[in-house]
Image (cartoon, helix red, strand yellow):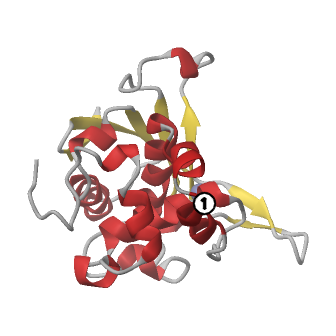
Amino acid sequence: MTTLHSRAGAIPLEGLPITPEQQERLSHTLRCVPADHLRSLQRIVIRDRQVRDSRSGEMREYAGGSTNATQRGWRDLSPHSRRFWIMIDIDSFDPRQRPINNRPSGKHYTLLHELGHLVDWSYGALSWIMRNDAEGFRLLARQPHNGITGGTQERFADAYADLYFHPPERTRDDPRIRCILQSPPFRTAWTPHTGIAV
Ligand SMILES: [Zn+2]
């Protein structure tokens, strides 16, 4: 079995084969986030999906990802049980389609975005923000998102990805980042802003 290395131990990698360099990019990305944020991640699966283009109506390669619950009744499972898996489309490694996943930093932005969904759902982060930080929620909701899916959940996932993708100088004064950092997933977790790896 192929596994990826993270601060939370080995994460199984399944589906289509990818190159050692692509595997290392996923492992490096997993190592950029704190162990606590990976405790509900069961596995990562590589697929080759297509989507229908909304303008032309033709099928085209999809170069994104998705986060999925592993079984029915997942809401009843304890917060840290491995109840989610992430699908990454193989075309997300294509430098022409997704230059952001091919930068010298070695990170895969799409995987960070999917981890944002997993962290949001594992901790109930966005619903916490909605209840406790109306101004932060408003700031998140109005941010544009480049993807086929919409909604404030996508903005949370983008803010999460930006936090771990960019150097801390770039995100320190970003009000979206300040907003998500107040929410439950970050109470005890390491971030680039605290600088202390756990
Ligand atoms: Zn998303």
Residue located at (38% from left, 22% from top): 81
Residue 156 to residue 47: above or below = below
Instruction: Decide which of 160, 126 is in the foreground and name it.
Output: 126
Instruction: Decide which of 106, 49 is in the foreground and name it.
Output: 106
The image shows a total of numbered marks equal to: 1
Instruction: Decide which of 132, 166 is in the foreground and name it.
Output: 132
Q: In x, y percent, where is residue 82?
A: 39, 26
Residue 133 visible within the image: yes
* Residue that carries the numbered disc 1 in the rendered image: 154
Residue 46 visible within the image: no
**The image quadrant in which ligand 1 is located:** bottom right
Q: Looking at numbered disc 1 in the image, what kind of residue is underneath it?
A: Glu
Q: In x, y percent, where is residue 41?
A: 39, 35
Residue located at (44% from left, 37% from top): 123
Q: Is residue 45 left or right of residue 58?
A: left
Per the image, label 1 sits on a secondary structure element best described as helix
Residue 81 to residue 3: above or below = above
Q: Is residue 44 left or right of residue 23?
A: right
Residue located at (52% from left, 83% from top): 96
Q: Is residue 194 left or right of residue 141?
A: left
Q: In x, y percent, where is residue 45?
A: 47, 42
Q: In x, y percent, where is residue 167?
A: 25, 78
